[in-house]
Image: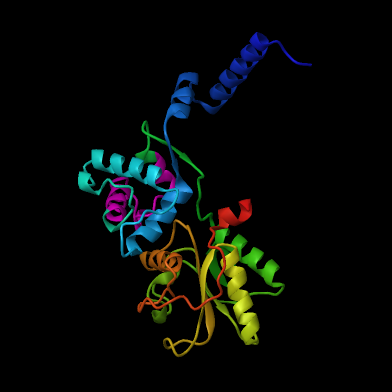
Protein backbone atom coordinates (compact mmCIF):
# COMPACT_ATOMS: atom_id res chain seq x y z
CA UNK A 1 0.00 0.00 0.00
CA UNK A 2 1.34 3.44 -0.91
CA UNK A 3 0.91 5.99 1.90
CA UNK A 4 -0.11 9.57 1.15
CA UNK A 5 2.94 11.83 1.04
CA UNK A 6 2.11 13.62 4.32
CA UNK A 7 1.58 10.29 6.08
CA UNK A 8 4.83 8.89 4.74
CA UNK A 9 6.63 11.99 5.96
CA UNK A 10 5.18 11.58 9.46
CA UNK A 11 6.14 7.90 9.56
CA UNK A 12 9.66 8.67 8.36
CA UNK A 13 10.04 11.43 10.95
CA UNK A 14 8.81 9.12 13.69
CA UNK A 15 11.18 6.38 12.64
CA UNK A 16 14.11 8.84 12.50
CA UNK A 17 13.21 10.13 15.98
CA UNK A 18 12.97 6.58 17.28
CA UNK A 19 16.33 5.55 15.83
CA UNK A 20 18.02 8.67 17.11
CA UNK A 21 16.65 8.01 20.60
CA UNK A 22 17.85 4.41 20.58
CA UNK A 23 21.37 5.46 19.59
CA UNK A 24 21.50 8.13 22.28
CA UNK A 25 21.80 10.91 19.70
CA UNK A 26 19.27 13.71 19.51
CA UNK A 27 17.39 14.33 16.30
CA UNK A 28 18.98 17.76 16.02
CA UNK A 29 22.46 16.34 16.52
CA UNK A 30 21.87 13.57 13.99
CA UNK A 31 20.67 16.13 11.45
CA UNK A 32 23.68 18.36 12.16
CA UNK A 33 26.05 15.43 11.65
CA UNK A 34 24.43 14.57 8.32
CA UNK A 35 24.91 18.17 7.18
CA UNK A 36 28.65 18.13 7.84
CA UNK A 37 31.12 17.58 4.98
CA UNK A 38 32.60 14.11 4.85
CA UNK A 39 36.14 12.74 4.95
CA UNK A 40 36.58 9.49 3.03
CA UNK A 41 38.85 7.58 5.39
CA UNK A 42 39.95 5.07 2.74
CA UNK A 43 41.15 7.81 0.39
CA UNK A 44 42.72 9.86 3.17
CA UNK A 45 44.73 6.95 4.58
CA UNK A 46 45.84 6.04 1.07
CA UNK A 47 47.11 9.60 0.54
CA UNK A 48 48.99 9.48 3.84
CA UNK A 49 50.95 6.49 2.51
CA UNK A 50 51.56 7.70 -1.05
CA UNK A 51 52.04 11.46 -0.82
CA UNK A 52 55.14 11.41 1.44
CA UNK A 53 56.94 9.25 -1.16
CA UNK A 54 56.13 11.39 -4.20
CA UNK A 55 58.93 13.32 -5.91
CA UNK A 56 56.36 15.97 -6.92
CA UNK A 57 53.23 17.61 -5.54
CA UNK A 58 50.70 15.52 -7.44
CA UNK A 59 47.63 14.76 -5.33
CA UNK A 60 46.27 11.29 -4.65
CA UNK A 61 43.07 10.87 -6.72
CA UNK A 62 39.89 11.22 -4.70
CA UNK A 63 41.67 12.39 -1.55
CA UNK A 64 42.01 16.16 -1.90
CA UNK A 65 38.70 17.25 -0.35
CA UNK A 66 39.11 15.00 2.69
CA UNK A 67 42.78 15.83 3.19
CA UNK A 68 41.98 19.55 3.10
CA UNK A 69 39.38 19.09 5.85
CA UNK A 70 41.91 17.18 7.96
CA UNK A 71 44.63 19.76 7.38
CA UNK A 72 42.32 22.67 8.25
CA UNK A 73 41.38 20.96 11.50
CA UNK A 74 45.07 20.42 12.32
CA UNK A 75 45.81 24.04 11.42
CA UNK A 76 43.07 25.30 13.73
CA UNK A 77 44.61 23.25 16.53
CA UNK A 78 47.93 24.94 15.75
CA UNK A 79 49.52 21.65 14.81
CA UNK A 80 50.04 22.49 11.13
CA UNK A 81 51.20 25.72 9.53
CA UNK A 82 48.67 27.25 7.12
CA UNK A 83 51.09 26.96 4.20
CA UNK A 84 50.77 23.15 4.36
CA UNK A 85 46.98 23.17 3.97
CA UNK A 86 47.10 22.08 0.35
CA UNK A 87 45.35 18.71 0.01
CA UNK A 88 48.72 16.94 -0.06
CA UNK A 89 49.16 14.51 2.87
CA UNK A 90 52.95 14.78 2.90
CA UNK A 91 55.48 14.21 5.67
CA UNK A 92 54.59 17.47 7.44
CA UNK A 93 50.91 16.52 7.62
CA UNK A 94 51.77 12.99 8.75
CA UNK A 95 53.92 14.45 11.55
CA UNK A 96 51.14 16.87 12.53
CA UNK A 97 48.56 14.10 12.65
CA UNK A 98 50.91 11.96 14.77
CA UNK A 99 51.28 14.89 17.16
CA UNK A 100 47.49 15.16 17.37
CA UNK A 101 47.25 11.43 18.09
CA UNK A 102 49.78 11.80 20.92
CA UNK A 103 47.77 14.73 22.31
CA UNK A 104 44.91 12.25 22.73
CA UNK A 105 47.16 10.04 24.85
CA UNK A 106 47.72 7.55 22.04
CA UNK A 107 51.10 5.88 21.71
CA UNK A 108 52.93 3.38 19.52
CA UNK A 109 51.09 2.27 16.39
CA UNK A 110 48.04 4.32 17.38
CA UNK A 111 50.21 7.43 16.94
CA UNK A 112 51.90 6.48 13.67
CA UNK A 113 50.57 9.45 11.69
CA UNK A 114 48.04 7.40 9.72
CA UNK A 115 44.48 8.52 10.48
CA UNK A 116 42.83 5.83 12.57
CA UNK A 117 39.09 5.69 13.19
CA UNK A 118 39.23 7.04 16.74
CA UNK A 119 41.69 9.86 16.07
CA UNK A 120 40.08 10.92 12.78
CA UNK A 121 36.62 10.97 14.37
CA UNK A 122 37.92 13.00 17.30
CA UNK A 123 39.62 15.50 15.00
CA UNK A 124 36.44 15.88 12.99
CA UNK A 125 34.05 16.43 15.90
CA UNK A 126 31.70 19.23 14.85
CA UNK A 127 33.68 19.76 11.62
CA UNK A 128 33.31 16.69 9.43
CA UNK A 129 31.96 13.16 9.49
CA UNK A 130 34.04 10.11 8.63
CA UNK A 131 32.87 7.78 5.86
CA UNK A 132 34.30 4.53 4.44
CA UNK A 133 35.74 3.66 7.82
CA UNK A 134 38.52 1.08 7.81
CA UNK A 135 40.62 -0.66 10.46
CA UNK A 136 43.03 -3.56 10.94
CA UNK A 137 40.67 -5.57 13.14
CA UNK A 138 41.69 -7.45 16.25
CA UNK A 139 44.90 -9.41 16.56
CA UNK A 140 44.71 -13.16 16.05
CA UNK A 141 47.10 -16.09 15.76
CA UNK A 142 47.55 -17.63 12.30
CA UNK A 143 50.16 -20.17 11.29
CA UNK A 144 52.05 -19.54 14.50
CA UNK A 145 52.21 -15.78 13.91
CA UNK A 146 50.18 -12.74 14.93
CA UNK A 147 48.03 -10.98 12.31
CA UNK A 148 45.19 -8.50 12.21
CA UNK A 149 41.86 -9.99 11.17
CA UNK A 150 41.80 -7.81 8.06
CA UNK A 151 45.18 -9.21 6.97
CA UNK A 152 44.02 -12.75 7.73
CA UNK A 153 40.95 -12.27 5.51
CA UNK A 154 43.11 -10.91 2.70
CA UNK A 155 45.43 -13.91 2.90
CA UNK A 156 42.48 -16.30 2.87
CA UNK A 157 41.17 -14.73 -0.34
CA UNK A 158 44.63 -14.79 -1.96
CA UNK A 159 44.88 -18.49 -1.12
CA UNK A 160 41.49 -19.07 -2.73
CA UNK A 161 42.57 -17.30 -5.90
CA UNK A 162 45.88 -19.17 -5.99
CA UNK A 163 44.30 -22.54 -5.26
CA UNK A 164 46.93 -23.53 -2.73
CA UNK A 165 48.05 -22.76 0.79
CA UNK A 166 50.42 -19.91 1.64
CA UNK A 167 52.90 -20.69 4.43
CA UNK A 168 54.00 -17.77 6.58
CA UNK A 169 57.65 -17.18 7.46
CA UNK A 170 56.96 -14.04 9.47
CA UNK A 171 53.84 -12.25 10.63
CA UNK A 172 52.89 -8.81 11.91
CA UNK A 173 53.37 -6.96 15.21
CA UNK A 174 56.90 -8.32 15.50
CA UNK A 175 59.06 -5.47 16.89
CA UNK A 176 62.71 -6.39 17.06
CA UNK A 177 62.21 -9.42 14.84
CA UNK A 178 64.25 -10.32 11.77
CA UNK A 179 66.80 -7.47 11.38
CA UNK A 180 66.71 -7.77 7.59
CA UNK A 181 63.08 -6.63 7.68
CA UNK A 182 64.19 -3.09 8.69
CA UNK A 183 61.16 -2.56 10.93
CA UNK A 184 58.48 -3.36 8.36
CA UNK A 185 57.01 -6.10 10.57
CA UNK A 186 56.96 -3.91 13.70
CA UNK A 187 53.35 -2.98 12.97
CA UNK A 188 50.36 -4.67 11.41
CA UNK A 189 49.54 -5.72 7.87
CA UNK A 190 52.90 -7.22 6.89
CA UNK A 191 53.78 -10.87 6.22
CA UNK A 192 56.58 -12.87 4.63
CA UNK A 193 55.51 -15.98 2.74
CA UNK A 194 57.50 -19.10 1.87
CA UNK A 195 57.96 -20.02 -1.79
CA UNK A 196 59.56 -23.37 -1.02
CA UNK A 197 58.51 -25.96 -3.58
CA UNK A 198 57.03 -23.37 -5.94
CA UNK A 199 58.09 -23.13 -9.55
CA UNK A 200 59.11 -19.75 -10.94
CA UNK A 201 55.70 -19.41 -12.58
CA UNK A 202 53.86 -20.27 -9.36
CA UNK A 203 55.89 -17.71 -7.41
CA UNK A 204 54.78 -15.03 -9.85
CA UNK A 205 51.19 -16.25 -9.67
CA UNK A 206 51.31 -16.06 -5.87
CA UNK A 207 52.52 -12.45 -5.98
CA UNK A 208 49.78 -11.63 -8.48
CA UNK A 209 47.08 -13.14 -6.24
CA UNK A 210 48.34 -11.14 -3.26
CA UNK A 211 48.37 -7.95 -5.27
CA UNK A 212 44.88 -8.54 -6.56
CA UNK A 213 43.39 -8.62 -3.04
CA UNK A 214 45.14 -5.47 -1.81
CA UNK A 215 48.71 -6.27 -0.85
CA UNK A 216 51.79 -4.43 -2.03
CA UNK A 217 53.71 -7.64 -2.71
CA UNK A 218 57.09 -8.52 -4.17
CA UNK A 219 59.15 -11.65 -4.68
CA UNK A 220 62.41 -11.25 -2.76
CA UNK A 221 65.62 -13.12 -3.65
CA UNK A 222 69.05 -13.66 -2.01
CA UNK A 223 70.75 -11.28 -4.44
CA UNK A 224 68.88 -8.37 -2.88
CA UNK A 225 69.90 -8.96 0.74
CA UNK A 226 70.77 -11.65 3.29
CA UNK A 227 67.47 -13.48 3.06
CA UNK A 228 66.06 -16.58 1.33
CA UNK A 229 63.61 -16.53 -1.57
CA UNK A 230 60.25 -15.38 -0.21
CA UNK A 231 57.32 -13.08 -0.88
CA UNK A 232 57.06 -9.88 1.12
CA UNK A 233 53.52 -8.50 1.33
CA UNK A 234 52.17 -5.31 2.91
CA UNK A 235 48.42 -4.78 3.32
CA UNK A 236 47.59 -1.42 1.73
CA UNK A 237 45.61 0.90 4.04
CA UNK A 238 46.24 -1.10 7.20
CA UNK A 239 46.17 1.72 9.76
CA UNK A 240 48.59 -0.18 12.03
CA UNK A 241 51.45 -0.09 9.48
CA UNK A 242 54.89 0.84 10.75
CA UNK A 243 56.45 3.91 9.12
CA UNK A 244 58.73 1.65 7.06
CA UNK A 245 55.76 -0.36 5.78
CA UNK A 246 53.87 2.88 4.99
CA UNK A 247 56.80 3.88 2.78
CA UNK A 248 56.71 0.55 0.98
CA UNK A 249 53.03 1.00 0.14
CA UNK A 250 53.71 4.49 -1.17
CA UNK A 251 56.55 3.19 -3.32
CA UNK A 252 54.35 0.40 -4.67
CA UNK A 253 51.84 2.94 -5.95
CA UNK A 254 54.72 4.82 -7.58
CA UNK A 255 55.94 1.73 -9.45
CA UNK A 256 58.89 0.93 -7.18
CA UNK A 257 60.11 -2.27 -5.50
CA UNK A 258 59.76 -1.30 -1.84
CA UNK A 259 63.50 -1.65 -1.10
CA UNK A 260 65.77 1.09 0.22
CA UNK A 261 67.32 1.58 -3.23
CA UNK A 262 63.85 2.36 -4.62
CA UNK A 263 64.35 0.39 -7.82
CA UNK A 264 61.63 -0.27 -10.38
CA UNK A 265 58.83 -2.67 -9.48
CA UNK A 266 59.79 -6.13 -10.74
CA UNK A 267 56.47 -7.83 -10.01
CA UNK A 268 53.45 -8.73 -12.16
CA UNK A 269 51.32 -5.79 -13.25
CA UNK A 270 47.81 -5.73 -11.84
CA UNK A 271 45.35 -2.90 -11.12
CA UNK A 272 46.31 -1.56 -7.69
CA UNK A 273 43.45 -1.89 -5.23
CA UNK A 274 42.92 -1.88 -1.50
CA UNK A 275 41.15 -4.81 0.15
CA UNK A 276 37.97 -2.76 0.38
CA UNK A 277 38.17 -1.78 -3.28
CA UNK A 278 38.68 -5.44 -4.21
CA UNK A 279 35.60 -6.49 -2.28
CA UNK A 280 33.49 -3.80 -3.97
CA UNK A 281 34.66 -4.54 -7.51
- Left or right: residue 114 compared with residue 277: left
Expressed as whole percent of the image width and height from the top left, the position of residue 36 reads 42, 30
Q: Which residues are magenta?
A: 93-121
Residue 4 horizontal/vertical position (percent)? 70, 10
Q: Nearer the viewer, residue 146 or 19?
A: 19
Residue 204 in the image, given as x and y percentages of width and height: 60, 79
Q: How many marks?
A: 0
Task: Kindly give the residue lying farthest to the right in the view shown.
Answer: 1
Q: Is residue 82 above or below residue 176?
A: above
Vertical order, 123 against 272 (above or below): above
Q: Does 133 sit left or right of 212 as displayed? A: left
Task: Identify the residue shown where x is 48% and y is 28%.
Answer: 34
- In this rendering, the answer to whether 8 lies above or below 211 is above
Q: Nearer the viewer, residue 83 or 210?
A: 83
* Residue 95 sits inside the magenta stretch: yes
Q: Is residue 156 left or right of residue 265?
A: right
Prevailing secondary structure of the magenta residues? helix
Residue at 72% across, 13% down: 3
Q: Residue at x 56, y 63 (%)?
A: 271
Q: Is residue 255 magenta?
A: no
- Front position in the image: 60 or 160: 60
Residue 109, can we see it? no
Quadrant where the N terminus sits is: top right
Residue 72 visible in rendering? yes
Quadrant position of residue 2: top right
| 15 and 208: which is toward the camera | 208
Seen as rendered, the residue at the extreme bottom is 223
Amino acid sequence: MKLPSYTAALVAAGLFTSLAGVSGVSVAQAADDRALPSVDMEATVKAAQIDPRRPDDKLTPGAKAGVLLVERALRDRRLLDAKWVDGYFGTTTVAAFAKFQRSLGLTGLAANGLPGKASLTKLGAGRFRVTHVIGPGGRVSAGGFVLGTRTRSMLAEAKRLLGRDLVLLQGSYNPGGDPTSAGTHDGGGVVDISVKGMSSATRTTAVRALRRVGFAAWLRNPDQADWPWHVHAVAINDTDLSSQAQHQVGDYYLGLNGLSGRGRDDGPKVPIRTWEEYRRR
